[in-house]
Structure formats: structure tokens, C-alpha cells
Amino acid sequence: MPDSENPEWSDADFKRAVTLDDLPEPLQKSLRGRPKAMETKERISGGAEA
């Protein structure tokens, strides 16, 4: 929803915009954040088994 802090994009804004793949690799990595873990944590307590 556009507002004063986040106005609706104009045609010029869209022409100036770039995709993530067009940015330098280090910036892409920082914007993507941490990679997902291959293995998730295993619950060891707090279950219904007790």
C-alpha cells in the first residue's frame, strides 16, 4: 500500500530498477542473508513422550 514513506513506483522507477542478479556478487550475498541449514535442530525435550 503506497504512502508518504513508500510511494507508488513511477515508470521511471521501474526503468531504473535492477534485479538481484544484476548487482555485484558480495552485495547479492549480503541481501540474500544466511543460507538455510542442511540439517535442522532435533528436539530433545518438551514432547508428549513424558
Image (cartoon, helix red, strand yellow):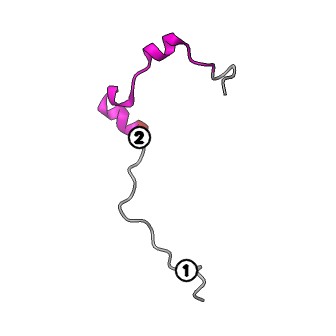
Element type at marker 2? helix
The Cα–Cα distance between marks 2 and 1, rounded to whole angstroms, is 33 Å
Residue 32 shows which numbered tag?
A: 2
Q: Which amino acid does label 1 sit on?
A: Ser
- The type of residue carrying mark 2 is Arg
Q: Give the range drawn in magenta.
A: 7-30
- Whether residue 14 appears in magenta in the rendering, the answer is yes
Question: Of helix, strand and loop, which one carries label 1?
Answer: loop
Residue 26 percent coordinates (x, y): 32, 34
Q: Earlier in the sequence, mark 2 or mark 1?
A: 2
Which image quadrant is residue 46 in? bottom right
Mark linked to residue 45: 1
The dot on residue 17 is: none
Query: Which quadrant of the rendered structure holds the N terminus?
Result: top right
Image-based side of 30 in relation to 11, left or right: left
Residue 1 located left or right of residue 29: right
